[in-house]
Image (spheres, rainbow, N blue to C red):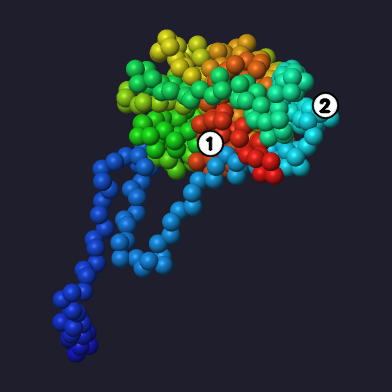
Amino acid sequence: MRIILHHSCDLMLSWFRRKPTDPKPADPKPGNGEPAVLDAAPPAPPEVPSAPPEQVTTPASKPGWRERLRDSALARTFSGLFSRNPRLDDALLEEIETALLTADVGVTASTQVIESLRRRMQAREFADAQALRNALRAELLAMLTPVAVPLRIDPASKPFVILTVGVNGAGKTTTIGKLARRFKDEGRSLMLAAGDTFRAAAVAQLQAWGERNGVAVIAQGQNADAASVAFDALQAAKARGIDVLIADTAGRLHTQGGLMEELAKVARVLRKLDPQAPHEVLMVIDGTTGQNAISQVRKFREKLPVSGLVVTKLDGTAKGGVVFALAREFGIPIRFAGIGERPEDLRVFDAEAFVDALLPETLGG
């Protein structure tokens, strides 16, 4: 009894010694009633206005196209050519042509550019190398400007269905995750369909992106029918009034006939629920593959109406000039370009910014 009384006295003394201004420990509060993280983004941490000035950091500005592409082979070559204020002669044109071909701009597109420059040079239109550089810029822009068409989400099509396709390793699943981040930031509701059922890791990867962005992911077991996954996802998206549905598909070589037929089946099944679906067939292309991208697009277009391209891994690649070849060969809108690994490095394709990143601004630039 003495021990118990002594302990009780200690507790009472500690209670009365507490200052009235001591904050009372906050009780854990239940959630705000929203669904789990797959359906809604987690709340942002509260701001701390009393933080000392030295602890407040200003976020670094987003690196531009020039910063991201300056190490590409084509950018380095052009910078070296024009920085030495070269003579205006056929040798210079041959160097420019070699640079274009090496970067996989393609024979036809490269020849078109060089012949135009040669005619103008012979007509003495260029007073100096700076004028030639400006003419080259105009030629390159003329090829890319018609295909620099951003993706527009039609609010009348709800959900707006984006079917992503491409060969193995092009970066489809990662691109979908980055697109999810972009659409969420725009205030759109969306859902993802894990249609790459051949790789268990692909489903897990897409689910991780969904959790990170607070987006629901519809998935089935491994080796499930991809068309069935897409169908279930579209049904769920319609029932929940979702703005955008992005459906993943398994990577496949364009030479694999059976797997290519499966893509056509996915599109057919989607049209059973929405005759206009998919509203966008977005093909993801690895920018490092060079001219092989041409045959990829050609084969995929035989099975699906590819309506937009995403060219990934353009930063640092020696073959990024393939965007010019794609533009000239197909005229398909290039919706986005991947110029880095972070979500914000998936940029809306900007023809002017892309070309200006390849060329020095001025002689010696």
Q: Of residues 303 and 295, which is closer to you in this image?
A: 295
- At 51% from the left edge and 14% from the top edge, which residue is drawn? 267
Neighbour tally class for label 1: few under 14, some 14-19, many 20 plus, Cα within 10 Å: many
Asked which quadrant contains residue 309, the reply is: top right
Tag 2–tag 1 contact (CB < 8 Å)? no
Comparing 65 with 341, the one in front is: 65
**Quarter of the figure with residue 6:** bottom left
Q: Position of residue 42 (x, y in %)?
A: 36, 46
Determine which of the numbered discs, if any, sits on residue 90 in the image. 2
Residue type highlighted by circle 1: Leu
The residue furthest bottom is 2
The residue drawn where x is 36% and y is 26% is 243
Q: Secondary structure at mark 2?
A: helix
Q: Residue furthest right?
A: 91
- Determine the CA span between mark 2 and mark 1: 38 Å
The residue to which callout 1 is attached is 346
Of callouts 2 and 1, the N-terminal one: 2
Residue drawn where x is 41% and y is 30% of the image = 191
